[in-house]
Image (cartoon, rainbow, N blue to C red):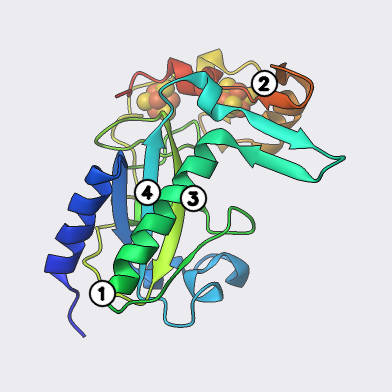
């Protein structure tokens, strides 16, 4: 079946109308290298396109996590807005006859890889997606649909990072190295250095993101 260029352009236009900063379309075939639980067809049996959307972190407060163990509440402000935007895209596609599923944050997809697969941009040395349009300061979410939409070309290397070591130098945990990113060191540093905004709300380390020169 041919991928639908017209519908893809309509969705791009619609995404702009509802305030989405970044959108990309990935072919599920490129997710086969990930664990089964992190593949699009784990969420939709007719997975034909993965839609990845991004919003710019315009203010650090949008990046706050609120966790209240007593009431079982755990949410991220910008992620809640992203999820809401995905519901709008889901409705838009359903009106045109295509069922979709919003992919939960966990276990979910590997969102940065999904963005690179969709051609939004490369993954930087700081292990975050760098959108070619708006830079590093974005948060992502995804939806899988049975609509055959035009997909982007996967990006595997970061041209931005070739002659840059800024994030390596500023990381207080030594988690970004020339030969790769050390997830555990990053996590350990984050968990012991959470910025507390209030009783239940924290912000994680953003030092590498703030320092990256590829910004919107
Ligand atoms: S700071 Fe430099 S090396 Fe690090 S992700 Fe940004 S561009 Fe790449
Ligand atoms: S989030 Fe903080 S600890 Fe983790 S890699 Fe970036 S600068 Fe280092």
How far apart are labels 3 and 4 at the CA level?
A: 10 Å
Q: Is residue 40 above or below residue 152?
A: below
How far apart are labels 3 and 1 at the CA level?
A: 20 Å
Position of residue 204 in the picture relative to residue 24 (left or right): right
Per the image, the residue denoted by label 4 is 53
Per the image, the residue denoted by label 2 is 173
Give whichever of 141, 121 is nearer the camera. Answer: 141
Q: Under 8 Å from ligand 2: the CB of mark 2?
A: yes
Q: Under 8 Å from ligand 2: the CB of mark 3?
A: no
Numbered circle sitting on residue 83: 3
Give the x, y percent position of residue 188.
75, 29
**Image quarter where ligand 1 lies:** top left
How far apart are labels 1 and 4 at the CA level?
A: 20 Å
Q: Secondary structure at mark 1?
A: loop
Position of the C terminus by quadrant: top left
Residue 194, quarter of the rendered image: top right
Per the image, the residue denoted by label 1 is 96
Ranked by sequence position, the earlier of labels 3 and 1 is: 3
How far apart are labels 1 and 2 at the CA level?
A: 49 Å
Front: mark 1 or 2: 1
């Amino acid at each position: 079946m041919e991928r639908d260029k017209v519908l893809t352009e309509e969705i791009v236009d619609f995404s702009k109308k509802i305030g989405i900063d970044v959108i990309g379309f990935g072919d599920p075939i490129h997710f086969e290298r990930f664990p089964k639980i992190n593949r699009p067809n784990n969420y939709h049996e007719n997975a034909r396109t993965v839609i990845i959307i991004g919003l710019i972190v315009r203010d650090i407060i949008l990046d706050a996590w609120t966790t209240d163990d007593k009431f079982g509440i755990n949410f991220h402000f910008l992620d809640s807005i992203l999820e809401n935007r995905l519901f709008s895209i889901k409705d838009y596609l359903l009106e045109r006859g295509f069922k979709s599923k919003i992919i939960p944050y966990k276990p979910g997809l590997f969102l940065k890889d999904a963005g690179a697969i969709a051609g939004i941009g490369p993954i930087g040395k700081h292990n975050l997606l760098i959108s070619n349009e708006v830079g590093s300061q974005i948060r992502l979410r995804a939806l899988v649909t049975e609509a055959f939409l035009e997909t982007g070309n996967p990006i595997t290397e970061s041209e931005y990072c070739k002659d840059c070591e800024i994030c390596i130098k500023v990381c207080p945990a030594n988690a970004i190295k020339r030969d790769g990113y050390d997830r555990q060191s990053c996590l350990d540093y984050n968990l012991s250095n959470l910025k507390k905004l209030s009783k239940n709300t924290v912000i994680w380390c953003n030092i590498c993101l703030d320092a990256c020169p590829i910004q919107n």
